[in-house]
Image (tube, rainbow, N blue to C red):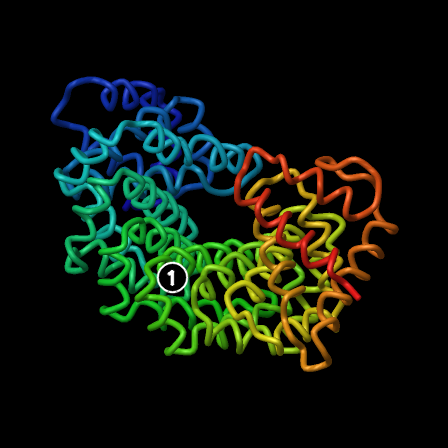
Amino acid sequence: HFPGNNAAVDISRSGILPSLAQVLQAQSNLHCQVALLVAEMAREAAVRELCIDAGLVKALVPHLNSNNPEMLLNTGRAIGRICFDNSKQQSVTDSRATAATTSCDCVSDVLKLQFSESAVPEALSEMIQDLQGGSDPHDLCSIKIASNLIVSLLLGDESMQKCFAEGSGPVYRDVISWLQCSNTQLQLSGALAIANFARNDSNCVKMLDLGVVPHILTMLEQHVDEGDVSVQHAGLSALRNLAIPATNKVRMLDNGVTDRIKTLLRSDMPPVQFKLLGTLRMMVDGQEEATLILGRDPVLLARVMEWCEAKDHAGVRGEACRLLAALIRHSRSPDVVRAVLHGGGVQHLISMATSEHVIMQNEALVALTIAAATDLGTGRGGAYNTVYLNMIGAYADSAPCVCLDSGSIQERLSKLLDHSNSNISSQAASILTLLEKKP
């Protein structure tokens, strides 16, 4: 540390800063000492803008790829301190300080693996540990840069596997600790890192064995009310990826995951709603018992119906309709069909069946076929009459859709008989057969 404020300012105004930038950009054994000097001088607010003007941030960024832990620590601190405070420096935080992450995103998987083999992620993680727990804004900025870099390095398949190391790698262990800390930035980076680790079934199964899910759920619950949207979105992404293997679905359902994430149903943030719906849909895929529970939950169904009408967010509307269809498809239950019909869900499925997206069309037609064929205990005609009437009502209330011309509902479905997708054509034929047999 400099003995007084004036020393750092006087040194920086002496004209030495551009020379320090040149040293950092040249081959030299002084890099570590220069980065330390810059980090110490940048404690003073009056010095930071001078550092920016001298090009020191640009000169420092490449050294975040150093395999020298001391160099990484000094570099991270220097950048974090320079890129903090007033408006000019804040713009640098947005552009320069994230340049390291952006450049890392652009490098090849081979280079990412080389960084991992040189223990760069471990060094960055160690730096974060050293800086954690304090409130120094400069250190917090350094933590953000370092954690973002680690997440970026995990985008490479081989570098990700090396860092995971069957769940025993120090980076993976540190990521778990980030989920449990109070630093929102580290929680966000931790959730994104887990989502990256969960890119293959083997890792997903191993992480469930190691108990990652409760940590994610506890973190999400901290952000339900007035929480951080990015953390909620990232946490749900991690859960969705972890739920892809069928064996994991069963285990996660047994651990009450759906009950705990349902607390996010009260969120009014579209990005969270979108990701929650997708996560629930992944959780019930092929899981009859879970589908029965969710499909008979009046609070969940009411919220899903509400989101099926989201006028300002097509993504939320689409995911809500897909979850509705999934509840019918995977349960094939009269209780669930009755609940969906009672809530007015068939009109949303009709709208989905006329979507321009082939996958959504097929999912809707399958759900409508099942609903129309379901005996609700009121005579065989009850269910498919209800479907038929809802189809007519939905058609009367809607404009001509992208895929189908105007005409009766049977004519509209007949248009799908020659669809290039065999699944859609067969489902359209099935539902037409049922409707034509109506009493």
Which sits in the foreground, 288 or 376?
376
Q: From the viewer's perspective, tell me whether residue 159 is left or right of residue 350.
A: left
**Total residue callouts:** 1
Q: Position of residue 122 (x, y in %)?
A: 19, 48
Q: Is residue 157 visible?
A: yes
Residue holding disc 1: 243
Q: Position of residue 126 (x, y in %)?
A: 21, 52
Give the image quarter of residue 435.
bottom right
Q: From the viewer's perspective, tell me whether residue 26 is left or right of residue 85.
A: left
What amino acid is found at the position of numbered circle 1 in the picture? Ala
Which sits in the foreground, 238 or 349?
349
Q: Position of residue 380 (x, y in %)?
A: 70, 74
Which residue does the image show at 55% across and 39% down from the upper left? 86
Query: In the orientation shown, which residue stands out farthest toward the bottom?
Result: 377
Disc 1 element = loop
Q: From the viewer's perspective, tell me whether residue 191 is left or right of residue 284.
A: left
Which residue does the image show at 35% across and 23% down from the upper left? 14
Task: Identify whether 83 is placed above or below 350.
Answer: above
Give the image quarter of residue 401.
top right
Which sits in the foreground, 101 or 401?
401
Q: From the viewer's perspective, tell me whether residue 246 is left or right of residue 388.
A: left
Which residue does the image show at 71% across and 45% down from the upper left? 413
Give the image quarter of residue 373.
bottom right
Task: Identify whether 130 is placed above or below 94.
Answer: below
Which sits in the foreground, 365 or 310?
365
